[in-house]
Image (tube, helix red, strand yellow):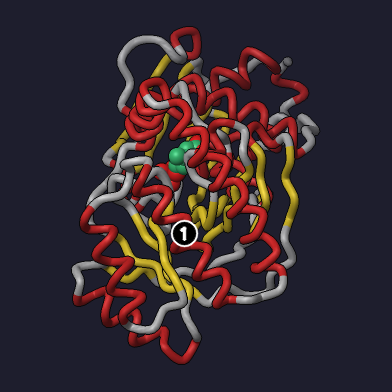
């Protein structure tokens, strides 16, 4: 692509974070999951810089004037915080060419320690920004595929559910690699979300489950099929807004995640604290090992559940779910 075709000088995009409501881990092996986008966003501004270098500034992640010459993208040492951006720019360059270097600046509404999917949100916001900057018309699925490849370049594993939330927003029924992305028309979700105080490393937990599956394939496969059934039941319950049932299904999902050995005592303590305070049900959200948990509860009890979670050591996260997918503000 020549620089003549690159018409815009600067583009700003934003993508939401996510919470997984049902189906984690099983989704890596082809089962469905349900993910909702949270209205805490990652903002990306991309502009041409006239030199042959990618320059990244992500002050909240401690990245100041990170530079990489375009010909070395994806190689040499790079801090984890910029690796997704670099992998994405490299993928984009391979497919569409990059006439000149880029300045990329990120700003996040949330800390990357919460497990809200800052890496997926930044990857999607970046791919959208590049496609707008270069005026390449890409379908959502094409944007997803580029972002998914970049994430796999870095993490090696993952279903891409978090990218789907960042791209399409709302609450979706999702199958790995976006083989299925079905938006669920859910007007609201009465939930309380708490951070366990521990940052989890998703690829490590995914590999840990793979190892358990290798050692005990029948047990793990049976857990996966039960989780997949729960996702189907959860989908119906969510669509009918049967919150009591959603809560019960979450508790079943939590038990199965405990059997997969990805839960922690702290997460279990938080789940119990939520239920003791009147939540319909609760579960960890994500790979496990830490990050956040989510509780579904009657709106009138939300403050009691929040108080109980805080007493049990959780940090209450004020989240608005069902957020809009990637947005582009043209400059
Ligand atoms: O840890 P999180 O919030 O990124 O969730 C990981 C969910 C897994 O199913 C374990 C992995 C995946 O990519 O689907």
Q: Which residue is mark 1?
A: 252
Residue 72's x, y, as percent? 44, 9
| Residue 282 in which image quadrant | bottom left
- Compared across the picture, whether 310 is left or right of 286 comes to left
Mark 1 neighbour density, 10 Å: few (under 14) some (14–19) many (20 or more): some
Q: For residue 220, which quarter of the picture? A: top left
- The tally of labels here is 1
Q: Is residue 285 above or below residue 204?
A: below
Is residue 134 at all visible to an observer of this figure?
yes
| Residue closest to the eye, 305 or 124 | 305
Q: Quarter of the image for the N terminus: give it.
A: top right
Measured as percent of width and height from the top left, residue 137 is found at: 80, 33
* 86 in relation to 24, above or below: above
Q: Nearer the viewer, residue 280 or 284?
A: 280
Instruction: Report if residue 46 is visible in the image.
Output: no
Q: Where in the figure is residue 266, as x and y percent of width and height? A: 22, 58
Frontmost residue, 294 versus 66: 294
Point 48% across, 73% down: residue: 296
Instruction: Report the residue at 33% width, 66% height from top.
Output: 271
Residue at position x 70%, y 17% in the image: 96
Image position of 121 (left or right of 111)? right
On the image, the x and y values in percent for residue 270 come to: 28, 66
């Amino acid at each position: 692509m020549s620089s003549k075709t690159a018409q815009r000088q600067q583009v700003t995009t934003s993508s939401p974070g996510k919470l997984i409501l049902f189906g984690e881990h099983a989704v890596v092996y082809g089962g469905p999951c349900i993910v909702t986008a949270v209205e805490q966003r990652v903002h990306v501004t991309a502009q041409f810089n006239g030199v042959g270098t990618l320059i990244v500034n992500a002050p909240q992640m401690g990245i100041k004037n990170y530079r990489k010459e375009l010909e070395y993208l994806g190689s040499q040492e790079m801090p984890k915080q910029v690796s997704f951006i670099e992998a994405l720019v490299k993928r984009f360059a391979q497919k569409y060419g990059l006439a000149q270097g880029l300045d990329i600046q990120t700003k996040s509404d949330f800390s990357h320690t919460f497990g809200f999917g800052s890496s997926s949100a930044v990857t999607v916001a970046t791919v959208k920004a590049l496609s707008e900057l270069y005026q390449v018309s890409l379908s959502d699925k094409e944007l997803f595929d580029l972002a998914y490849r970049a994430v796999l370049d870095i993490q090696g594993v993952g279903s891409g559910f978090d990218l789907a939330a960042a791209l399409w927003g709302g609450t979706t029924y999702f199958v790995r690699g976006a083989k299925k992305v079905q938006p669920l028309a859910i007007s609201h979700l009465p939930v309380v979300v708490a951070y366990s105080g521990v940052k989890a490393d998703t690829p490590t937990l995914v590999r840990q489950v793979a190892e358990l599956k290798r050692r005990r394939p029948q047990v793990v496969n049976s857990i996966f099929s039960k989780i997949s059934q729960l996702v189907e039941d959860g989908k119906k319950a969510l669509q009918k807004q049967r919150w009591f049932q959603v809560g019960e299904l979450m508790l079943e999902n939590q038990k199965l995640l405990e059997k997969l050995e990805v839960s922690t005592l702290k997460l279990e303590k938080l789940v119990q604290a939520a239920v003791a305070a009147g939540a319909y049900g609760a579960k960890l959200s994500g790979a496990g090992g830490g990050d956040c948990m989510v509780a579904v509860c009657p709106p009138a009890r939300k403050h009691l559940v929040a108080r109980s979670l805080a007493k049990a050591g959780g940090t209450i996260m004020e989240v608005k779910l069902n957020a809009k997918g990637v947005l582009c503000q043209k400059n």
